[in-house]
Image: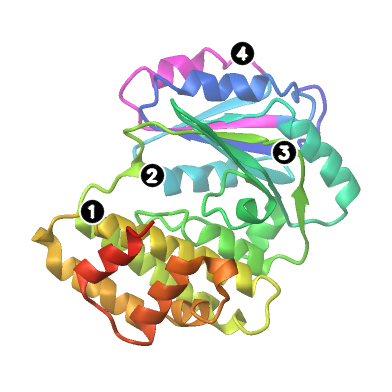
Amino acid sequence: MHQDKTLISVVLAVYNLELYVERAIQSFIQCRADEFAELIIVNDGSTDRTSEICEKYLSRQDVRIITKDHSGLAAARNTGIEKSMGDYVVFLDGDDSLDEGLLQKLKLAIKEGGDVDLFYYNWQEINNRTCILVQEYDAMKTVAVWNKCYKKAFLDKNQLRFSESCLFEDIGYSPRAFVLSNKVRHISGKPLYYYHVRPDSASHRFVTAKDRLSAIRALKKLERELLPILQSDQYADMITIYIMDCWWFHIREFLKEEDDHGYVLGEFIQFLCESIFLKSASKFNFKTLGLKKSLLCILITRMGIKNRSFIRFLITLS
């Protein structure tokens, strides 16, 4: 790093990602931002070759490695925030990659944007079969934190950290940031973050039905926190639809489960019936939510429909 001031810190939390981490690190290097950016690799107690791969880059002045006992992604990211030297913080998952133009575009946006608390940008999902581009509105309500750039002073002022007691640490972070921010800017154009889908990714599976219930409870907690702003905040509609999309995902996933965890499904349906956000979402027009989601909101929150087979039938309608 050739200058004293670091503008952007990229936090890369890794745990047993020997097959993917080099791609993530190389994507940072290819941004050619060593004059104003740093990569903070937080090694969360990896037991495979992840440490060995990361240590190959220790000679670079723009790369730092922090090694800690395994305590989960949330704690690793929090460590990265605390140790970051940049004015802004970007999160990179160890199995994903940055576009080579991301950091330069962020540098320009920060220079032109004034006192912006949060930038967000388009991203692309990549798997073995397809590439899906996610643009402005959907990029804004993306649950993940990795397509966003946060002002560190803003994070510190509002004590925005990841919940280390919650299995699903991403769920509430971005909505809280949007609500608390004074100024948000979208960086338009090509995707600047690449989300690589892998079959064994933790974000694509739940170990147990109780894990999913933990995610639902995290959503309920988020509802309670954000409810006061539902009527007035400029992001109220976006957050309502965002939470509805989360509910929709869990509804679909629950219906894939066998009936062995009926008590978990029962608690989940009870959550749905009490959800203020679902009741609010049922007032949206069909064009905004889509026909199936709108009907499901109405059936669950207004008519008390709790029949698993009927809900499955509705969701599987073409």
Instruction: Give the number of the disc on residue 58.
Output: none
For the residues labelled 2 and 3, the Cα–Cα distance comes to 26 Å
Earlier along the polypeptide chain: callout 1 or callout 2?
Answer: 2
Query: Label 1: which residue?
Result: 256
Q: Secondary structure at mark 4?
A: loop
User: How far apart are labels 4 and 2 at the CA level?
Assistant: 33 Å
Query: Mark 4 to mark 1: distance in Å?
Result: 48 Å
Residue hosting label 4: 59
| Residue 54 in view, yes or no | yes
Query: Which is closer to the viewer, label 1 or label 2?
Result: 1
Mark 3 packing: few (<14 Cα in 10 Å), some, or many (20+)? many
N-terminal of the two: label 2 or label 3? 3
- Residue at the far left in the pictured view: 260
In front of the other: label 4 or label 1? 1
Q: Tell me if label 3 and label 4 are in contact, CB under 8 Å.
A: no
CB of mark 3 within 8 Å of CB of mark 1? no
Cβ atoms under marks 4 and 2 closer than 8 Å: no
* Residues at discs 4 and 1 in contact (Cβ within 8 Å): no
| Residue annotated with mark 3 | 8
Does residue 297 sit above or below 54 in this rendering? below
In percent of width and height, residue 82 lies at 58, 47
> Which numbered disc, 3 or 4, marks the residue closer to the eye?
3
